[in-house]
Image: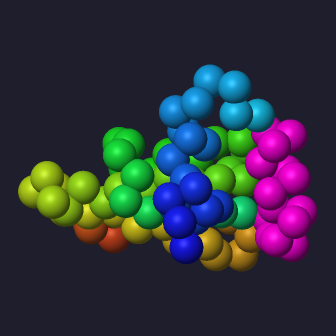
Amino acid sequence: MTRNGPLWYRGYFSEQDFSENQLDSILAFYGKKHIVVGHTHCEGINPIFKNKIFGIDARISDGMPGEMLIYKNGNFYGGLATGVRIKL
């Protein structure tokens, strides 16, 4: 794995010219529907391109209680430490 591989690449969230068509090509190449990129500096869970890709930073290192991505019955949720689920 490299920093430019599909799981570590951060340009999905910061490059202005990264497009949904480019993402669709990556997903098709790997035969997947979604990509989750952890340790991505954002506020909690950052879904883009209609939930095709998620940037996640639980912010535990910032003293925050954390957050998790939950996939259940075809839906994505942000799971809070309180047990609350927020549909994404």
Confirm whether residue 52 shows in the render.
yes
Say which residue appears at 64% left-offset and 61% top-offset. Answer: 6
Coloration mode: rainbow
Q: Which residues are magenta?
A: 20-33
- Magenta span dominant secondary structure: helix
List the single residue furthest toward the top.
16
Of residues 25 and 82, the one nearer the viewer is: 25
Drawn side of residue 10 relative to residue 62, left or right: right
Drawn side of residue 16 relative to residue 52, left or right: left
Say which residue appears at 60% left-offset and 43% top-offset. Answer: 12
Drawn side of residue 85 relative to residue 83, left or right: right
The picture places residue 33, in percent across and down from the top left corner, at 80, 65
The picture places residue 70, in percent across and down from the top left corner, at 53, 71
Q: Is residue 38 above or below residue 73?
A: above
Of residues 8 and 47, the one nearer the viewer is: 8
The picture places residue 61, in percent across and down from the top left corner, at 15, 60
Q: Is residue 68 above or below residue 26?
A: below
Confirm whether residue 79 shows in the render.
no
Say which residue appears at 65% left-offset and 53% top-offset. Answer: 53
Asked whether residue 26 is drawn in magenta, I would say: yes
Rendered image quadrant of residue 80: bottom left
Q: Is residue 34 above or below residue 47?
A: below
Asked whether residue 57 is drawn in magenta, I would say: no
The picture places residue 60, in percent across and down from the top left corner, at 19, 62
Of residues 68 and 33, the one nearer the viewer is: 33
Say which residue appears at 44% left-offset and 56% top-offset. Answer: 56
